Amino acid sequence: MADGTKHKWTIVFGIVAGAAVVAAAALSHWAAQGKVTGDTPAARIASIRRLADDRPPGAAVAVAGAIDDPDAGVRRAALTVLAQFPEGYHRAVGSRINDPVPAVRAAAAATLGMYDEPDVAAALRRMLTDPVEEVRLGALTGLGRMDQPDATAALFAAAEGNDNVEVRRQAMRTLAARLKLRFETPPDPVKTPRRWRRALAQMRRMPPVRDALAGEG
């Protein structure tokens, strides 16, 4: 084989080999994109956020897997991001409503509301009795995301009689937004109790609330 031909094939093989290396590196990078990576909680949280932004193949599965991370901050981030991937992970999210860390329970409650099913509404209603206010407010966020009549009934019950005043206020605001009901001055259960009771009575007469309460038997 002439020297020129040898030189030609050397260049060709070099180009092919180089392209293969580049392709392998690209595939490796793409595969890594579909995983939660990082040796520290901060790195894993950043990885979860990148998955939410980039949406590579396998992103939702990877984020769902991170809800069992040993770090509470990572679990919370994963649960929050899963709200962007409502693809049948409600059982996985529901597994964290009894997490020992209140912030994680709150994130689980808020995301759980993306799954509009009766058993979800029931679970969130139970969370309105959590000893930590943050968790109750997360449950209200979840209920506010749902269209279930059971969610409407739970919001009304919370506004009417929850033993946490801030929960009652937030339940009233969430329910008013659902009903497209606007108050010139929002009623308050402590400062304006009579107006608060009148607002509840008005809501009770509105068809979505009336029908939801009737459905509870």
Image (cartoon, grey):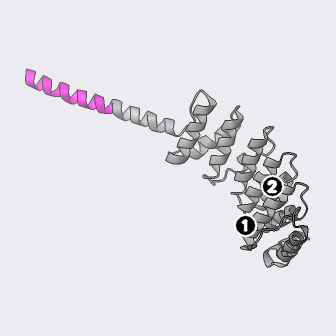
Which residue is drawn at the image coordinates 82% and 73% (left, top)?
A: 209
Across and down, in percent, residue 22 comes to 34, 32
Q: Is 138 on the left or on the right of 66, as rendered?
A: right
Q: Amino acid at mark 2?
A: Leu
Tell me which residue sits at (85%, 54%) in the image. 128
Range covered by the magenta-colored residues: 1-20
- Residue matched to label 1: 147
Is residue 148 covered in magenta?
no
Q: Is residue 173 left or right of residue 4?
A: right
Q: Which mark is residue 124?
A: 2
Q: Which mark is residue 192?
A: none
Residue beneath the point at 51% across and 45% down: 57
Relative horizontal placement of residue 179, taking residue 31 as reference (left or right): right
* Quadrant, the C terminus: bottom right
Name the dominant secondary structure of the magenta segment: helix
As displayed, is residue 54 above or below residue 21? Answer: below
Instruction: Give the vertical position of 152 relative to 9 (above or below).
Output: below
- Vertically, is 217 above or below 133? below
Q: Is residue 9 visible?
A: yes
Residue 135 image position (x, y, % from top left)? 79, 48
Q: CA distance from mark 2 to mark 1?
A: 13 Å
Q: Dot 2, crowdedness within 10 Å: few (<14), some or many (≥20)?
A: many
Count of number-bearing discs:
2
Residue 207 position within the rendered picture, expressed as x and y whole percent measured from the top left: 80, 78
Estimate the x, y position of residue 68 in percent, counting from the top left: 70, 37
Q: Name the residue located 56 percent from the left edge and 37 percent from the top edge.
A: 47
Type of the residue with mark 1: Asp
Q: Quadrant of residue 197?
A: bottom right
Q: Secondary structure at mark 2?
A: helix
